[in-house]
Amino acid sequence: MTIQTGSLSDPTVRAFVSAVNNHDREGFMALLAPGATMADDGSERDLADWTDREIFSSHGHMDVDRESDGGRALVVRYSNDVWGEMRTRWSFTVDDGRISHFETGQA
């Protein structure tokens, strides 16, 4: 059963999911702390390149199935135009309302 975006516990993560699903690049970027980083399947990636390719250019969408760690860890059915739908995990480091690091990968 999908958790509605508005019901996600952590307000910053909730805004992240909303920005992804609404294809709001500006809102997404505003959530990131200066120097923010990310990893995909355990490998550090160039954040700007990865988000453009995996989220914005390919119409990424997150359907959250489960949250833990106060809403900073998610299990998601993630889909985009390149890979289709896959079950993924996401974890976020949030400092002062901004994301300094996030990780994703196969769940």
Image: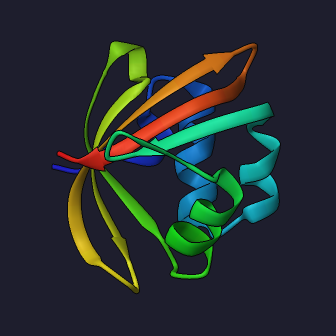
Residue at the image position 40 percent from the left and 86 percent from the top: 81
- Colouring method of the image: rainbow
Residue at the image position 59 percent from the left and 45 percent from the top: 16
Residue situated in front as seen by the camera: 106 or 61: 106
Residue at the image position 41 percent from the left and 23 percent from the top: 71
Residue at the image position 70 percent from the left and 58 percent from the top: 48
Q: Position of residue 66 (x, y in %)?
A: 23, 36
| Residue extending furthest toward the front | 43
Q: Position of residue 53 (x, y in %)?
A: 56, 74
Name the image quarter holding the C terminus: top left
The image quadrant that residue 69 belongs to is top left
User: Does residue 63 appear left or right of residue 54 in this picture?
Assistant: left
User: Does residue 72 appear left or right of residue 34 in this picture?
Assistant: left
Above/below status of 18 relative to 92? below
Residue situated in front as seen by the camera: 81 or 22: 81
| Residue extending furthest toward the bottom | 81
The image quadrant that residue 3 belongs to is top left
Above/below status of 78 relative to 88? below
User: Does residue 68 appear left or right of residue 96 in this picture?
Assistant: left
Q: Position of residue 52 (x, y in %)?
A: 64, 70
Q: Position of residue 61 (x, y in %)?
A: 43, 67
User: Does residue 25 appear left or right of residue 74 in this picture?
Assistant: right
The image quadrant that residue 101 belongs to is top right
The total number of labels drawn is 0
